[in-house]
Each structure stands twice: as C-alpha cells, then as structure tokens.
Image: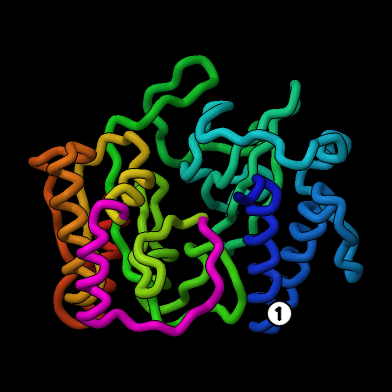
Amino acid sequence: MLTSFEYCQAIAEADLRLAKARSDMNAVERAIDVVNQVRRQLGQPRVPELPMHIPDPSLQDQLGSLPNGMPHYRRGFGFCVGQRVKWSPNPDRYGVVLRIFEYGRNRIIVFRADDYVPFWTSPSLLEATQEAPGHVGEACVARKSERLLLMPCSGMKLDFAAPASTLYTGVMWQSLRANWCGSTRLAILSAKHGIVLPHEVLAPYDQRLDQDRVDELLDELRPQTERVAAAIDGAHIDQVLVAGGHLYRQVLLAIVAQLKSNRAIGGDVPVNQTVGGIGEHRAQLGAFLRSG
C-alpha cells in the first residue's frame, strides 16, 4: 500500500520523465521542483539540477516538519478532492485538487495544474472555479450528484510505471485530459488487470482485450463490480458514460447492470455509450465531460 507521499512521488517522477521525453525544458524545471519536494518528505536525495521551489514560500518551514505518511482527506478547507480550482498567484493557472492534508494547524493542498504538474500550495491561494455545494463550516460535504465515467485502457502508454490516470496516452485519454471535470467518478477497464482505479500505479504492459479475456472478466463480474463501487465511494450518481470499443463495453455494461442490481447506483440512472468511429467516440466523451 503506497503512502500519500509515495503516491505523490509516483506522479511527480512520471511527470518528470514525460517532460524529459518531450524535451520540454520548462516542464522539466517545474517537474524537478515537485520531485524534490516529495523526495524531501521521503528522506531521499534531491534531483541536483535545480533548487527546490515552493509556490507559497511561507509553507517551506511547515513542509519541512511534515512526517512521512501524513494522513490525507477527501474533503476539507472548503475544497473537495477532484474539485476544479484556480491558483490565485497566477490567474491563468487552473487545475484540480489532488490531495488534502492537515498536520496540526498546518493546511496543505496538492494542486495539479492543467499542464499535469502537481505542487504543494496553501488553501488560501486557491479559488474554486467549480461550485462545491453543501459547505458546512470549512468542510465540504459530498456533492448532490456526480457522473460515472467507465474508460477503456489504451494501447499507447508511457514506458515506465505510473498511476493509471497518467499511464495511458491514447487519443481517448487525450480527450479525457483536455475536458476533465472534477465532478466525475472514474474507473478504468484494463485488458490485463481488469478494473483499476485512477490512483493505482501500474507498470507498462502489452495485452489486448479479446473475446476470451472478456469471458474471463465476465466470470469475475463480482470483484470487478466491487472495484467500480469503490470508485463511486457512496456518491449519488445521476449519469453514466461507458466509453470504448464493443468488447470493453460488453464488460462495462455488465458491470453497470450489476451496480444497479446492487443499488450502488439508481435503477433509473441513464447509461450512455460512445459509438461510431474514433472521432465520434472522442467527441461524445468530451461532450459528456464538459456537461458536468
């Protein structure tokens, strides 16, 4: 089981390798900053090329005192994990809340910008751009409704281990990242692993989904359904989109039927599918995400 910092490190190291692969030196510089922040918490040596940078300098001493494995929360400080926000020092920098931490009186949020670079910041430097209804004091309670997106894996992947939400690089995943909305719950059907959640770190693999594998997954429907239920995590789902080719949809639609049977989602919740050519699939996925 990864600790919070080990999870953040997996994302940060993946971003650094991807930036280097693209020869994007600005992205490399930002990624090194993030890697050094996380390595510091884990007691690991720094990446030596550049000094560590923390967007909010007032947090430097606080971060130095944060212990490895510090507990994290889904909600707090007026924000929810996955909520879309703006970083106020740079009014053009948008992203989502990735993790929420509290240690004593210190309050830290990991904010992942739209350029996929995560960094530590203070809640006071974030401004919500997507309403999080149901505030009670400083705690954000669950949304009244959210959507569920069931995605296929992709043949195109990074060439190193990374969280599932980062590992896949195919065109459907490009559309997902371009249109992502924090009010959407996500689960992924991997041809090799079955249902995986976005934060789970996977090594690259080469396995296609064929009918024999579909039959195996359908025989394992209960544990696959339980994995999707874990992604829902008690949220009230009011819409479902099943994306991918017909073999993926065959498994995912069976899972949705089981979720309805188990009352993890309502029996009257509409379930849509992406259909047509790849361009139509991408357009339908983007429209679903933007409608949130």
Q: Nearer the viewer, residue 9 or 33?
A: 9
Rendered location of residue 28, percent (x, y)? 74, 72
Residue 4 in the magenta stretch? The answer is no
- Would you place residue 97 above or below residue 254 in this image? above
Can you identify the residue that label 1 sits on?
Answer: 20
Asked which quadrant contains residue 287, the reply is bottom left
Q: Residue at x 35, y 32 (%)?
A: 143
Bounds of the magenta segment: 200-223
Q: Is residue 108 in view?
A: yes
Check disc 1: other Cα within 10 Å, few if <14, some if 14-19, many if 20+. some
Image position of 125 (left or right of 76): right
- Circle 1 SS class: helix
Residue extending farthest to the top is 137
Residue lying furthest left in this view? 268
Residue drawn at point x = 62 percent, y = 45 percent: 87
- State whether residue 290 appears in this view: no
Q: Quadrant of residue 236?
A: top left
Q: Is residue 154 left or right of residue 27?
A: left
Q: Nearer the viewer, residue 246 or 207?
A: 207
Q: Who's the residue at 61% across and 76% down the image? A: 160
Give me the residue at 49% from left, 35% from top. 80
Residue 213 magenta-highlighted: yes
Residue 148 spot, x, y in % from top left: 28, 50
Number of marks: 1
Looking at the picture, how far across and down is residue 77, in whole percent? 58, 27
Question: From the viewer's perspective, is 16 left or right of 50?
Answer: left
Q: In the rendered view, tell whether residue 38 sits above or below residue 49.
A: above
153 shown above or below 91: below
Residue type at numbered disc 1:
Lys
